[in-house]
Amino acid sequence: MIVRDWLVLAESALSGVESPKLEAQVLAAHALGMSRASLLAHQDAELPEFIDELLQRRANHEPLAYILGYREFSSRRFAVRPGVLIPRQETELLVETALRLAPQGGRVHEVGVGSGAVAITIALERPDLVVTGSDISPVAVSTARENAEALGASVEIREADGLHGLGVYDVIVCNPPYISLAERGALEAQVRDWEPPEALFSGPTGFEFYEMLAERAAAHLKPDGFIALELGIDQSEGVRALFNSHGWRFESLTNDLAGIPRVIAFQRGPS
């Protein structure tokens, strides 16, 4: 089938996604190995048979990033696959905060590295830093290592559960699992049914991972070190109170483009 005819059918098949016309074009361009602009200029091109498999996967709410095999983050392409959290645009604020807080020649560690988007971007933007990352998921660790090599980033990535076995750093960054189990049903199917639950859900309250970090992360920071964390919706006050209760000093709170408090940072308090 030619592009022009397939796009009409695909847009209808994708009526359950947010941007059916755009995503149909992205799938067709991907199948032909060309840009969207080139696709729209060659609508009489014949599409390969496997395009219908891609369409069915997206119609079943499989994330577009998994189908394409990558997601753009900070103007770089990161490989992603099932079992690896897909990086979001708002997480770029976590990178910006870490870059601001990290001293010249400092050590930065990301807990829960996922695709490696955060740690790798920090390393590429600040070659003076020693950047490392860890994740409990072997799939995430291998994907992050793959991305580091592909992008030429010097980032050591290891398998670890939370803070277990980590060293001491100037800055710790983390986009933790912060969704409560009660909120699971309200998530989009492409998130709820496809992305790794260990990267999404922390437990009954949504604050469990923050609690662990508030209690234990200071032992892995230098005396004047910082921790920067991504937040879920309506979590900023609770996280701030939690860290204050463990002796941390509030450093900053950054809103995303929608005005939602998205990244919070604290400095290690007195020992």
Image (cartoon, rainbow, N blue to C red):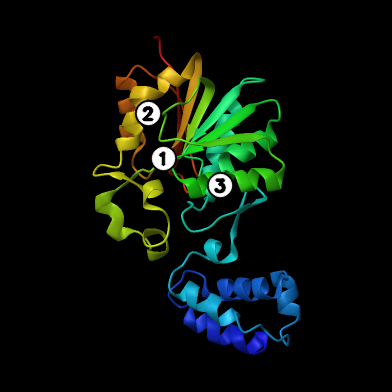
Q: Along the horizontal axis of the image, is 151 left or right of 27?
A: right
Mark 2 or mark 3: name the one nearer the start of the chain. 3
State whether residue 141 is above or below residue 37.
above
User: In the structure shown, which secondary structural element does the residue marked by tag 2 occupy?
Assistant: helix
Q: Is residue 116 something that shows in the picture?
A: yes
Give, as a three-letter code, the residue at label 3: Ser
Give the labeled residue for mark 2: 213
Residue nearest the observer in this picture, 82 or 221: 82
Per the rendering, the mark at residue 80 is: none
Mark 2 or mark 1: name the one nearer the start of the chain. 1
Q: Mark 2 and mark 1: span between their CA atoms?
A: 10 Å
Q: Is residue 257 something that shows in the picture?
A: no
Residue nearest the observer in this picture, 194 or 35: 194
Give, as a three-letter code, the residue at label 2: Leu
Give, as a three-letter code, the residue at label 1: Pro
Q: Which residue lies at the image location 53% right of the left edge and 79% below the top edge? A: 53
Q: Residues within 10 Å of mark 1 (few under 14, many from 20)?
A: many
Q: Residues within 10 Å of mark 2 (few under 14, many from 20)?
A: many
Horizontal and vertical percent position of residue 198: 37, 47
Horizontal and vertical percent position of residue 168: 50, 19
Give the labeled residue for mark 3: 142
Image quarter for residue 232? top left
Q: Which residue lies at the image location 40% right of the left edge and 9% below the top edge? A: 270
Q: Which residue lies at the image location 34% right of the left edge and 39% below the top edge? A: 235
Mark 1 or mark 3: name the one nearer the start of the chain. 3
Q: Is label 2 in contact with label 1 (beta carbons under 8 Å)?
A: yes
User: In the structure shown, which secondary structural element does the residue marked by tag 1 occupy?
Assistant: loop
The residue mark sitting in front, 1 or 3, is 3
Can you say which quadrant of the picture contains the C terminus? top left
Give the labeled residue for mark 1: 176
